Amino acid sequence: MIAELGHFALITAFAVAIVQMIVPMIGAWKGWSGWMAVASPAASAQVALVGVAFAALTYAFVTSDFSLRLVVLNSHTDKPMLYKVTGVWGNHEGSLLLWVLILALFGATAAWFGGQLPATLKARVLAVQASIGVAFYAFILFTSNPFIRMPVPPFNGEDLNPLLQDPGLAFHPPFLYLGYVGLSMSFSFAVAALIEGRVDAAWGRWVRPWTLAAWLFLTVGIALGSWWAYYELGWGGFWFWDPVENASFMPWLIAAALLHSAIVVEKREALKAWTILLAILAFGFSLVGTFIVRSGVLTSVHAFANDPERGVFILAILGFFTGGALLLYAVRAPVMQAKGVFGVVSRESALVANNLLLVVSAFVVFTGTVWPLVAELAFGRTLSVGPPFFNMAFTPFVIVLAAILPVGSILPWKRGRGRVLRVLWPVAVLALAVMGLVWAMQTGRSLGGPLGAGLGVWLAVGAVVDLATRTGRGRWSDRLGRVTRLPGADWGKALAHGGLGITVFGVAALIAWQQEGIAVLDIGDRLTVGKYEVVLNDVTQLRGPNYVATRADLTAWENGRLLGDLFPEKRVYPVAQMPTTEAGIDSSLTRDVYAVIGDAQTGGGWAIRVYIKPFANWIWGGAIIMALGGLLSLTDRRYRVAAGARKAPATGGVPAE
Amino acid sequence: MRGLVLAALIAATPALAVEPGEQLDDPVLEARARELSKGLRCLVCRNENIDESGADLAAELRILLRERLVAGDTDTEIIDYMVARYGEYVLLKPTMTGVNMILWIAPLTLFLLGGAVAGVAITRHRGTPAALNPEEEARLQALMDGDRLT
């Protein structure tokens, strides 16, 4: 009964979205305010209805209602409650329901907080947003309905893919979706602006919070996924250039570019047409990502829906929205005339370079990801494009981007003079000194480690210097006081750039200085890796709620100092017939000791692997700092005053008009 | 093919990547083996190299690779041997031959093209702001006179 209620709510939401797509658009065209006003209540109704549908499906999972086909395929009574809930989106149908829920939620926030948007723009934005909704409701209802009943309900379910039964991966999809779908808002704003024929500084300011939110959610989602891969897949890799990872990385890169070009629109009224194009591309890449994951066309770990019909449907959605928007762009973009002028050496030019590097690197990822498909379909060559290609083709752009970032972020708008860059000289010297020191200290293996350390220092210290220059001149005590009162956007910028430096260093350090040891250990045997030692104390069998595990008890020492015990596990999920590994990790600021247990050997003993992963946590720590920077920037009061609050600022001072 | 992947998944016990027993005694040869196996794809896995994979086929390939190394093959000979046996699909780093050149040249080409376009755009943006048109002059005057802009 409750499932039927959810099903009915979803169909009603589809109908509401159709109305929201058509009526406000006509209203904005004819100038009928009554028709335009339909958009906001419709957006609220949509979110309520999809919310009911999602709650109904969650209820079915929580109560293990095995009359629903989806629950049978993805759940089991023995599964822990947390994974019963996260199982709702751990499958194709449910994850799409989550997708439309977030889509409706974003549309509704634009309706609720968009009080200061011009009425026609708001109506058009909501209508475009609803049209995306219509496409996805149709997709769910006609090809991937989560509410289909079983003719004969079985006694128990087939369990969720064990790899997904993990806290890191359980919350990875919602964050990614918040990012993907958040970019639909930038897209709707871009298309609405093209229909409207007007892009100005105010538009730049309205579109930026959505992009910022989408980018920060994508950052968190990607970091969670990478962290999960690190501790779960059993050899401590953190990025595999897997098609599904690339699918989330491309929108992230484009969103980062859009974020920066929207600043130029907001502050300087330049790069308008380019920003619109980026907004279309960013959501286009989100849809490409959805297509890659959902169609299973490029086989990989996450492609749990290998259904061509669905793939074709998503391809049609992708073609319609991206193609349609690009067509509209071709017709209307010449209308967008840039007002701001700037010199060759200026913040604007630096941001153009930033955009160029980010977009080209996104296209490198794109060509590498689709090349196996193209080569097979067009040239009949079955081949692979793996990490060696991406590392070679992608890394140079990141290095150049990191090298110019502190310079660009400190250059003034319009016309820069070399003079302002004087403050960066000490940072450059410091970065080079660190690079040389690291080069001298390591045993002459790679260039990657020193380069990563140098760039990390350059970015992180550069961000601090950038923040310091914002405090103006005068005594240090005054400037220290001023730095706490700087706008959120300044802090956000410094944190995001500094966080990037930390991640760059972490990645370079882990790749360059990782150590490993592999051995067969009997109980009581010892394995030495560098200055670390591990002793196997015991191996036990134990039962979890829905798995059986072989668990090793290892004690780790660093230079004879006791670190503690590690408990790596090897689990088998009998219902899903799948093994997983759980690494035993001793984390610290400068390194992880990472242990994995393997098979029992025929001659006695166990295969044990121990890795020393230097600065591993810095990779995700930097990503979290980047996301935090995005969050701080989002809380900047200037957005709320300009784009959000319905009430006038209560503070006294200069009247607004 | 899908059946095969599924079968491999079910059959695979949770194994480690490189097994201790597989390793060569000569550290130089073993280091070369590790390096080479990072560039070879485990054919039944999804985007894993044979160094990291726990699948049985990956283990067979690792042993095969080491046998060739002990027999004295060079790196290129081993890679050619693997390609002859399993096809181009086994290489994680695509060859720089034929149409693959498009893939390898694309990044730099895109960058140079984009750079040229950006350069033109930047030089076009250079200059002084245009003078106000009469309409804007009037609006400015109205503002200066203290009138409200509606």
Image (cartoon, rainbow, N blue to C red):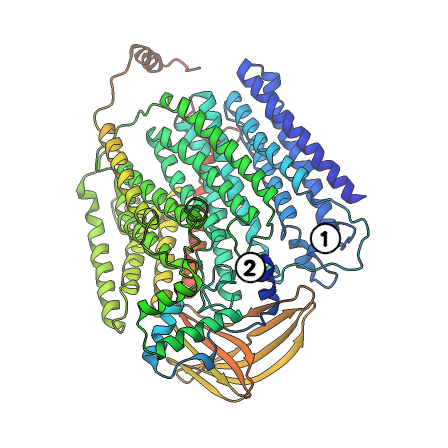
Residue at image position (36%, 53%) is A498
Question: Is A328 placed left or right of A51 in the picture?
Answer: left
Secondary structure of the residue carrying tag 2 is helix
Does residue A649 appear anywhere in the picture?
Answer: no
Q: Is residue A505 above or below residue A295?
A: below
What amino acid is found at the position of numbered circle 1 in the picture? Answer: Val
Looking at the picture, do discs 2 and 1 lie on one chain?
yes
For residue A336, which numbered disc appears in the image? none
The residue wearing badge 2 is A168
Is residue A514 or residue A44 the one in the foreground? A514
Q: Quadrant of the N terminus of chain A?
A: top right
Subunit of label 1: A
What amino acid is found at the position of numbered circle 2 in the picture? Answer: Gly
**Label 2, residues with CA under 10 Å away: few <14, some 14-19, many ≥20:** some
Does residue A71 appear anywhere in the picture?
Answer: yes
Q: Quadrant of the C terminus of chain A?
A: top left
The part of the image, by quadrant, that contains residue B64 is bottom left
Question: Is A636 placed left or right of A314 in the picture?
Answer: left
Position in image of residue A175 (x %, y %) = 54, 49
Going from the N terminus, do you reach mark 2 or mark 1 first?
1
**Label 1, residues with CA under 10 Å away: few <14, some 14-19, many ≥20:** many
Position in image of residue A264 (x %, y %) = 34, 34
Position in image of residue A344 (x %, y %) = 21, 35
Q: Is residue A201 above or below residue A547?
A: above
Residue at image position (40%, 66%) is B82
The part of the image, by quadrant, that contains residue A313 is top right
The residue wearing badge 1 is A71
Mark 2 touches mark 1? (CB < 8 Å): no
Question: Is B17 placed left or right of B107 in the picture?
Answer: right
Q: Is residue A500 above or below residue A183?
A: below
Subunit of label 2: A
Is residue A43 or residue A605 the one in the foreground? A605
